[in-house]
Image (tube, rainbow, N blue to C red):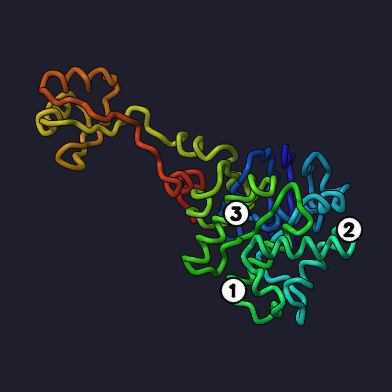
Amino acid sequence: MLVSLHNVGKRYGAIRALAGITAAMDGHIIGLLGPNGAGKSTLLKCLLGLIRFDGQAEVLGMSAAENSFRIRDRVGYMPETDCYLPGMNAVELCTYAAKLAGLPHREAMQRAHAALYYVGLEDKRYLHVDGYSTGMKQRVKLAQALVHDPDLLFLDEPTNGLDPRGRDEMLDLIAALPERRDCAIILSTHLLPDVERVCDQALILHNGSLRFSGAIAKLRSDGRKTRTFDVAVKQNLAELAASLEAAGCLVTVKSPLSMTVELGDDHSAHLLFARAKQHGAQIRRLEIPRESLEAAFLRVVGGQS
């Protein structure tokens, strides 16, 4: 298990940042999803042992409250905000990060060059990070998180501020990490398309509370109407649609050869086949519509963003 949470809570004075979260996170790339202010960054800092919290949390089988230094030996952290020292170039920054993780200087330097090559900054590695563009700063943050070869990565809003091309490139890098670097990832973001593109699991927070934890496929299927079907036919759709409506079904025609059918309580999918045969409307496709990730997200947070 990558992360285990039991009644994890955190307050900043009167503000409740996390409200007794209990969940387990496992998988290749897990999306920590929620609107700004949901508690995502606070949860990552709790897991790294950077701030005190109530309850119990384990990362890679170690207590976040008692073994924070051991956890940070095995976890790479890419924070949301910039985290470089003025006047350092990328090699110096990544070497410094590797040495903080306990690597000797020579190995730290080698790892720094390798990490910068992986993120595509090999030709910019001796430039001062101060002068980097937003996209380059995001890449160097990823490189410093990778430099000590962690088992688990915490990436906090890694596509923040990137243009469409830079965002695509960053997501491609992230998607390849589990196989190329043999590490798991917890990706914190408020951007649904990022999670949809690279994640297989999701944990959704809203106002500090847990709203969902599990596979993204399950998130979508939980809101699926199992008595609703997308239907495509070879011909005679109008006749079939009229027949189904007469039988009490709700029909929405989407094209000359496709429609959505919501069956009545007294009917099963058998009705579709029987009426299609009756009207010579050969069924080419019959499937339960898949809920969009946006619709699923709005459903679990109660329609609030």
Can residue 14 be seen in this snapshot? no
What is the distance, in whole Å, between disc 1 and disc 2 at their CAs? 29 Å
Q: Quadrant of residue 94?
A: bottom right
Q: How many marks?
A: 3
> What percent of the width, then of the height, locates residue 66?
88, 47
Left or right: 280 in relation to 71: left
Q: Which residue is mark 2?
A: 102
Q: Say if residue 69 shows up in the picture.
A: yes
Residue 174 numbered tag: 3
**Considering the numbered disc 2 on the image, is that residue within a helix, a strand or a loop?**
loop
* Type of amino acid under label 2: Gly
Residue found at x 60% / y 54%: 174
Q: Amino acid at mark 3?
A: Ile
Q: Nearer the viewer, residue 115 or 35?
A: 115
| Distance of label 3 from label 1 (alpha carbons) | 17 Å
Label 2, label 3: how far apart the Cα atoms are: 25 Å
**Residue matched to label 1:** 134
Tell me the kind of residue under disc 1.
Thr
